[in-house]
Amino acid sequence: MNLGLIACRHPLLALERARKREALLQATERELDAIVQATTRPTRRLTGQAAIALRGAKVRNRCKLGKHCQIAITETPLRYTRATQRLAADAALDGVYVVRTRVSGATLSPARTVGAYTSLAAVERAFRSLKTVDLYVRPIGHRLTERVRAHVFLCMVASYVEWHMRQVLAPLLCDDDDKAAGEARRASVVAPAQQSPRARRKTRTQRTDEGLPSQSFQTLLDDLATVTHNRIRFGASQTEATMLTTPTPLQQQAFDL
């Protein structure tokens, strides 16, 4: 089976990696400066090549970027410089990552491969919702194998239903309900995600296109929970009637969707 390797460069990852490398380099240099000061102070001076080398080795092991500093250890004060060539080679790979697939390029293009990889974030959000946010698969109050499996199965079905509800209720939610327009605004598949004009308008006004207040999924469910089905009995006549809550415009649109 053919293996496909796709190299991508993410600009935000490149900036973050460069920032973190510079911060770690500065932290390493502060540690080395402390050794330099220890070898030049007037009292209790750090002397001896072995002792200086031991302090330098501790810094290299503790600070992960000690390899990017060229350290000269002698009987005289410690000296160090940045390894510019090694730093340049490291910086050339900033933001670069490789995605490997067993699917041929004719079936899955490089852009779709990277898109499928980045879409794993949706799977991670689903697991988070299943475990802690909405459905709380744990604690499982069962011991028999079949009952545990049934419990997990029902939670999975509930997660599936919730996904469908979020799709159809997206016009009322704070979510972006025009993702195609947002994708069209991206320069490439590895560029930062962009909101669609409709989503940006909802974020700015906190209103839907119909002028209704935009909701989170949970607040919308809480609002729909106020709709009741009441069975009323009138006195001794035993006459009964059904009374339904009159939906608000927001609730009615949710039902229509």
Image: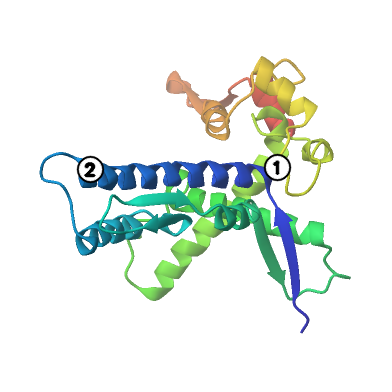
Q: CA distance from mark 2 to mark 1?
A: 68 Å
Q: Quadrant of the C terminus?
A: top right
Mark nearer the N terminus (2 vs 1): 2
Q: Quadrant of the N terminus?
A: bottom right
Q: Nearer the viewer's eye, disc 2 or disc 1?
A: 2
Q: Nearer the viewer, residue 93 or 85?
A: 85
Instruction: State yes or no: discs 2 and 1 in contact (Cβ < 8 Å).
Output: no
Q: Which residue is mark 1?
A: 167
Q: Nearer the viewer, residue 73 or 17?
A: 73
- Picture coordinates of residue 171 (x, y %)? 73, 30
Q: Nearer the viewer, residue 179 or 111?
A: 111
- Picture coordinates of residue 98 (x, y %)? 67, 63
- Picture coordinates of residue 218 (x, y %)? 53, 33
Q: Residue at x 73, y 61 (%)?
A: 7
Q: Which residue is mark 2?
A: 40
Q: Residue furthest left?
A: 44
Question: What colour-coding does the image apply?
Answer: rainbow
Dot 2 surroundings within 10 Å: few (below 14), some, or many (20 or more)? some
- Is residue 64 visible in this depiction of the protein? no
- Tell me the tag on residue 75: none
Total numbered labels: 2
Q: Amino acid at mark 1?
A: Gln
Is 43 placed left or right of 164 in the picture? left
Q: Amino acid at mark 2?
A: Thr
Q: Residue furthest bottom?
A: 1
Q: Residue at x 63, y 48 (%)?
A: 163
Q: Residue at x 56, y 58 (%)?
A: 86
Q: Residue at x 44, y 59 (%)?
A: 67
Is 98 placed left or right of 182 in the picture? left
- Picture coordinates of residue 240 (x, y %)? 53, 27
Dot 1 surroundings within 10 Å: few (below 14), some, or many (20 or more)? some
Q: Helix, strand, or loop for circle 2? A: helix
